Structure formats: structure tokens, C-alpha cells
Image: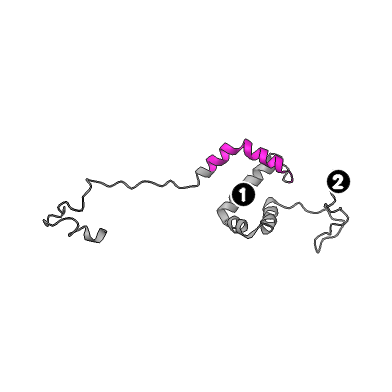
Amino acid sequence: MWNPFKKKEEDVQPPAGASSKEPAKKESIEQRIEREIDSLPGMIKNKLKDPQIKQRFIDIAKRMEKDGVDFKSIRQMKKWMKAHEAELKASQAGDIPKVETFVHEGPKIGRNDPCPCGSGKKYKKCCGKDKI
């Protein structure tokens, strides 16, 4: 299909210092992602500057490339993501630390109960006054 916005090969200028007869070197995934990140809106760009998120993004892109996904086709990328959804979520779950619930040891002391230190005062007037 003809695309009027696509540059013709003779219109594309080689990078500075490279001759027009030399074949262009293929960009690595990291370079392509870095270039794409720079073209994104600020809010998304800031999130992708986080090294962990960026590395995860690069790892997924490498897997997609290995599986032969065309990055210019959004349909192929969505199809690949849907097919690998379960394993992507599982690998992401391993990165997030689990939050553990704090469990009190021993019986709960009410504020009007006698203080366990043995002073004879109420807990709220003795050891519990700093915990309000």
C-alpha cells in the first residue's frame, strides 16, 4: 500500500560522517527505544526514564523481536501481548515486594486497663500516654 508520508529511500540522508554507499547499520533495540522515548509526552517519558521500567520494556521488546513481531504493526504487538499476558504478569508479580501484616504478640491492652508494668495506674496514664 502506498503511503504518501513515508520518505523515499533517496530522500533519506545518511548520518553525518557516513558515506552514501555504505549500508546503514541496524539500530539496536536499546537505541530504537531511546529514540522512541524521546518522542513521547513528558509524563510517559518520565516514567520510562526509571531504569527498572526501562529495562523491563527493553526485555519485552527483545522477546518480541526474537518471536518475529513487526514493531510497525500495532496489531501484531497487541496479539503478542495478549498471547503472553499470563507470563508477563507472573514475571511482573515477582518484582513487587509483598506487604506483610504486622501481628501483635501477646494480648491487646485496653487504654483503661491496668498498666502491665505493675505501677497500678491505668495504661493510658502510664506507659500508654506516649502512644496516643
- Colouring scheme applied when the structure was drawn: one colour
Horizontally, is 61 left or right of 94 in the view? right
**The C terminus appears in which quarter of the rendering?**
bottom left
Nearer to us in this view, 118 or 132: 132
The magenta segment is 72-91
Horizontally, is 103 left or right of 28 in the view? left
Furthest-top residue in this view: 83
Horizontally, is 121 left or right of 34 in the view? left
Residue 26 percent location from the top left of the image: 76, 51
The residue lying at 62 percent from left, 47 percent from top is: 59
Of callouts 2 and 1, the N-terminal one: 2
Position of 116 relative to 87 (above/below): below
Position of 129 relative to 69 (above/below): below
Q: Secondary structure at mark 2?
A: loop
The overriding secondary structure of the stretch rendered in magenta is helix
Q: Amino acid at mark 2?
A: Trp
Furthest-left residue in this view: 120
Q: Nearer the viewer, mark 2 or mark 1?
A: 2
Residue 114 percent location from the top left of the image: 14, 52
Residue at image mark 2:
2
Residue at image mark 1:
57
